[in-house]
Each structure stands twice: as structure tokens, then as C-alpha cells.
Amino acid sequence: MTANQEASSPHTMNTYGRLPIALSHGQGCRVWDVNGKSYLDGLGGIAVNTLGHNHPQLVPALQDQIGKIIHSCNYYHIPLQEALAAKLVELSGLTNVFFCSTGLEANEAALKLARKFGHDKGIEHPEIVVYEKAFHGRSIATLSATGNEKIQKGFGPLVEGFIRVPLNDIEALKAATANNPNVTAVFFETIQGEGGVNPMRIEYLQQVRQLCDERDWLLMIDEVQCGMGRTGKWFAHQWAGIQPDVMPLAKGLGSGVPVGAVVAGPKAAHIFQPGNHGTTFGGNPLSMRAGVETIRIMEEEGLLANAVKVGDHLKAALARELGSLPGLKEIRGRGLMLGVELHLPCSELVVRCAANGLLISVTADTVIRLVPSLIMTTEEADEVVSILCPLIHQLLKEKA
């Protein structure tokens, strides 16, 4: 594929608004396309490439695993599952793990857990609290939990059993669930990703945890995008000093190899029994090796501390360069999950940044999302700012 060829293929479904770029290889936080053009990767495969590209420890570990066994079905014990589960339990303070392949599958499993939790208590029609602007996936159930009418359109009837509330408003949550004995769980992202990098406030997280305890609900926190060290703690909710009952993970867990997981605490860990849930590919030896090695390397290289250091540096630099702009609404997020919201749609910045050697995304129409690899340096963060900020200034000037 050359840069001037059509972005779409005649043989793949027309499901993505692709740029006319085909990447061939990467090194660290840089990638190259098939024409040899270099890009600084500020997107990290959408918060997936935790260790960047071609990591010198990850690659040989995966090559070693491929030479041993790639896939084993779950009829048999898989020792690497036990190793990765033990590590996730240690890091989260929870007790048990179910492995799958994607964030959608992890969230789907969480929804099933909440429903069975209700049925086991004699609730015939369990209901789950979800949030405005949420994104949990594109299956029919996770799409129904998602708070985006634009991507729900054309796929009705949606799954019933969801109660939608606004972010960071405990009184709204209490009002929406008042005198409703069918509620079984509250489900949200600690920092919404696709919805526009919208964080839940620390005091709100603590209030919801307390409410779930009082009412015997499951607290289910979607850490698919904001987890795995992205904010500077292993899981973003840990900034609030709380624990969920159910925690879906994916994206950064395998540094590019598809891995999903549902980590559960005592209240939810034994809801599923044999026959209640399963997967063909989930927990295969290759993906488990990727997860084990990702966490090991993150610990060895101090990548949680790096996410804080570089994220703070990047956020401060963005504020310095953009803070006085009348077209800027807010710079928000934590660690290396940052959003720059403008007062107007800015999707054309994706193309303009790519032309200038920077990969980003725009989500919720007006929010520039930066979720680079956790190995990014402060020098690379400065390079992001040097490319991105002049293009924002130019766009706002054109539309003034």
C-alpha cells in the first residue's frame, strides 16, 4: 500500500475510517510506514502497546513461547494462566481471574456475573447501573451498556436491564436506584476512554464503593483502557484507595498480544461455576506469556513511575502551550492517559498530525486523546507537544 492509495480495501468490510497509512515496523515509541516515513506514536495502538514496539526483552520471550506451544484449550491446565492470575491477584488485592481475549469479552463476562449474582439472590430481572458517555464494547450487550446513541443506532432492540446515570453525581445515582430491588451492580470506567477521557472523581469512587457495600451491589470497574499502569498505578481506581468486586482488563495487558481478563474479589469470584462461561482462545499459552512478561518488564523498568513522571511533564507542557487559547476547553486525565478538549470538532487533527509525523486520535469529536506507550521519555513528550500544539493553534485560527 502506498501513501496515495485508497485507505480501504476491496476485500475487508468497510468498518474503519482508515488513514492512507500502512505501518511496517516500529522501535520503542516510533513506527515507520511502508514508504519509510517515521512517526512518533502518541496512540500506542489505542493504549495497547505498553512496552512500545520491538521491546528487547518481550520479543525473544514471545519467540521462545511460539517455539514451545501457542495454543492449548481450557480442557487442560495451563501453568502460565496460574502465573499471570497469581500476579494480577497480587497487584489488585482481589482473588480470582477469568481469562479471555479482548476488553469486550471481559466486559461481557462482567455483565453476566452481575446478572447471575442477581438471579442467585432471587432477582428475576437484574438491572445494572451504567453511565452517560460510557464505552464498554460493540457486542449487543456491551453496546447496550455503552452511552453513545450514535454507535447504537441501527442495532436495536438493545439489551434491557440498564439504568443510566451521569458521571460524578452520587445523588443522581441514589435517585435513579431509589426503591428498586432489582439493582445488582454499578459498572463504569475509572477514566472514560472513548467517551472523551473523562475521569471519575476520587471522592465519587469512594462514595460508590460505600453505596455498593450498603446495598449489596457489585462494584464493577472497567479498567480496560485506564488500567495496567497507564495512570501511574496498576489500576486507575487505586488512586481512590478502593477495590472493586469485578475488574475487566485488556488492552495493555499483553503489549499487543490479545489478552483480556476479569479479576474478581470474594463477592464475585465464585459466581461462575463450570458450564456458566467459557472461551476457546482465552488464556492460551502465548497470550499468557505476553501478560507475564509485560508485567515483569514493567516492574523491572519502573514504568508506573515513568507514566507519572512523563505524564505530568506532558500535561504541564500542553497547559503551557495551550492554556491561554480561547478554543481550549480542558486538559484532563492522569499519567499517560490525557485528553485535550477543544470547543469545536477537531478530527482533522488526526490527518494533520500524521502528515507531520505524529500519531494521535480524536474521540468524542472534540477530544484529542494521547495514550502512548509507557516507555515514552520526557524528550519524546516534548516532541509530541512541538508537533501537536502548533497544529491546534492553526486549526483554531482557521475556525475563529
Image: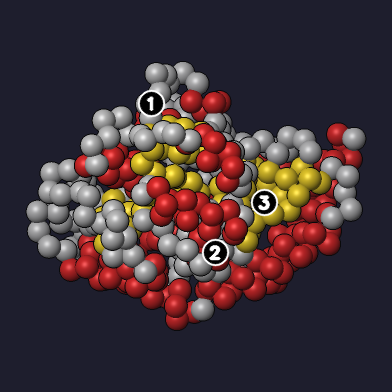
**Residue at the spot x=27%, y=35% of the render?**
123
What x and y, as percent, mark residue 55?
Answer: 45, 70
What residue is disc 1 on? 160
Q: Is residue 328 above or below residue 179?
A: below
Q: Amino acid at mark 2?
A: Ala
Looking at the image, tell me whether mark 2 or mark 3 is earlier in sequence order: 2
Q: Amino acid at mark 1?
A: Glu
- Looking at the image, the residue that sits furthest to the front is 179
- The answer to whether marks 1 and 2 mark residues whose Cβ atoms lie closer than 8 Å is no
* Quadrant including the C terminus: top right
**Residue at the spot x=21%, y=42% of the render?**
120
What x and y, as percent, mark residue 271?
Answer: 22, 50
Q: Is residue 360 above or below residue 400?
A: below
Which mark is on residue 339? 3
Q: CA distance from mark 2 to mark 3?
A: 20 Å
Q: On the rendered structure, is 139 left or right of 197?
A: left
Looking at the image, tell me whether mark 1 or mark 2 is earlier in sequence order: 1
- The answer to whether marks 2 and 3 mark residues whose Cβ atoms lie closer than 8 Å is no
- Looking at the image, the residue that sits furthest to the left is 75
Q: Amino acid at mark 3?
A: Gly
**Residue at the spot x=45%, y=81% of the render?**
300
Q: On the rendered structure, is 123 left or right of 274?
A: right
Residue 41 visible in this rendered orientation of the protein? no
Looking at the image, tell me whether mark 3 or mark 1 is earlier in sequence order: 1
Q: CA distance from mark 3 to mark 1?
A: 32 Å
**Residue at the spot x=71%, y=64% of the render?**
314
